[in-house]
Image: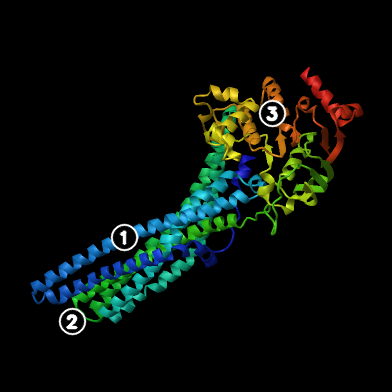
Amino acid sequence: MARNTYGVDEKLETPFSFEHLKRASVYIVKYKNKMLLALLISAIASATGLLAPLLTQTALDESIPNKDVRQLITLAIFLAGTYVISIILATVRSKIMTVVGQDIIYDIRKDLFAHLQKLPFQYYDDRPHGKILIRVVNYVNSVSNMLSGGIINIILEFLNMFFILIFMLMVDVGLTFVVLSGMIPFAIVIGIIKKRQRRAWQDQSNKSSNLNAYLQENIVGAKVTQIFVREEENATIFDGLAEKLRKAWMKAVNYNNLLGPSVDSIAIIVRGAIFAVGLLLLGPTAISVGTIVAMTSYAARFWQPIMNIANLFNDFINNIAYLERIFETLDEPVTIDDKEGAEDIGDIKGKVEFENVTFAYEKDKTVLENVSFTVNPGERIALVGPTGAGQSTIVSLISRFYNVNEGRILVDGKDISEVTLKSLRSQMGIMLQDSFIFSGTIADNIRYGKLDATQKEIEAAGRTVCADRFIRKTTDGYMTEVKERGALLSQGQKQLISFARTLLSDPRILILDEATSSIDVQTEKDLQEGLNELLKGRTSFIIAHRLSTIRNCDRIMYINNKGITECGSHDELMAKKGDYYHLYTAQMKEVS
């Protein structure tokens, strides 16, 4: 299964288009002044450096034949000066572009992260997290170089070509056309390689994404791998993905490597043609040695920017594929968002209504169909039933993590699709089955949903959920640093911290999705006392497969067959001897 999941390449999106660069210009225009300054400095440095062959020509044709030592020394000083000025200007330009490049990285990564924060659960359900991560980190780094230095360098290299062409025409018009004749075979080479090269780099990008996704999942799941002795199998899968990446990389690099030798070969032939035309066809008296030397020097320099443009074009080919992936992420629709004109829901009391709600995660796979019920403020509702029947779906819809397909959900009489997400979710406390712990202190994790909470409030929440006992035993108490995902904490301890985090936010609607599944029976009994006090006056939805924990709920809803098949108190449902009765009695037999 892992082979199929991580061996599937992402679709190669669109053909090479400057529209991608046009769209990316929003990240460039903010720094246009700095980039124009860098371009101006680079142009001055380039023009200054191009004086060297003219100075050499003057020395060979005038100073040396005339034995003019003073002129020769003056030319040497000027020549040294051009190199010094070029180095200084290049250093300044490099510093400017480094700052611009980092600013662009910051802007793109900030926009990507902000957009990822808004994307619905469905987006993360459908994609390996490693493939998302590589776009935010690797792809942004590569693209920033193209958007800053890459564009400047391409403009600069074209300016270099223009300056060199002017200087060549000043030296000899006929030999200039000899140099330009090499452009025809160069254009043919570019035309042949370009399309294949882009496809090769896109394929390499896919293979890198596949490998990164598999690697990220295996790092997170390292404990499970060792428990089930999957090391050899996983290594085989990794080797296969790494081998595909290696082959894709080598294929792409081979196309890159075709350009360099091609341009070098053309440049050598052109320089040979200069000697042939200058000395053999025009004759030794028709053209000076200084002219030949200057023209060969300019010809060598003329092909250098062409070579640089070819290399930059390679980078553009590579990075356009990355840019596509970045824009693909930014274009991912935010399906769960505030509607235009959405209002603040205000302080809620906690009445929840489902009106003929139908929902499916995937088309033609309905989870809930025409579900209707009303929960009054302060009621405790338990949701039970077979695994996958839709209990967690109901609480996810109340929190508007997904949009309903049909019907509507109301809180205090207001359609939740018509109010702002912030005003709704800020008054809901949601304790999920998977207790996620962030890097930082235990106190930081508890105050995650209420940043202005005082230390006394944090400790009070810890005592209420019975987390205070084990927290006090840690090295620094509430200031103890916990590692990523709470690696050194037990699952029960993570759930207790997550409980404290949820309760501290003081919600009007409380959702507990298997919240006590990893807590031992004794701790659960102690915790229940604190919860009973806390749940007073709050609407609560409790999902629990341990049915003994929900007997005191006001109502128990049995979810099955895409809807609510039974609803009532524990005693009422036991008396009916229906689905809930059979589930409860079967579980009690297992316990006894």
Q: In this rendering, does residue 203 appear at all?
A: no
Residue 516 tag number:
3
Residue 92 tag number:
1
Secondary structure under the numbered disc 2 in the rendered image: loop
Amino acid type for the residue under numbered disc 2: Thr
Image quarter of the N terminus: top right
* Residue holding disc 2: 285
Marks 3 and 2, Cα distance to the nearest angstrom? 99 Å
Colour scheme shown: rainbow
Secondary structure under the numbered disc 3 in the rendered image: loop
Marks 1 and 2, Cα distance to the nearest angstrom? 45 Å
Residue 387 tag number:
none
Please identify, in this view, whether the residue under mark 1 or under mark 2 is nearer the observer: 1
Other-residue count near label 3 (Cα within 10 Å), few / some / many at <14 / 14–19 / ≥20: many
Looking at the picture, how far across and down is residue 506, in whole percent?
66, 37
Secondary structure under the numbered disc 1 in the rendered image: helix
**Residue 106 left/right relative to 389:** left
Looking at the picture, how far across and down is residue 441, in whole percent?
52, 33
Q: Nearer the viewer, residue 31 or 418?
A: 418
Kindly identify the residue that appears in the image at 78 percent across and 24 percent down.
548
**Residue 165 left/right relative to 20:** left
Q: Nearer the viewer, residue 395 or 63?
A: 395
Using the rendered view, name the quadrant where residue 238 is placed: top right
Other-residue count near label 1 (Cα within 10 Å), few / some / many at <14 / 14–19 / ≥20: few
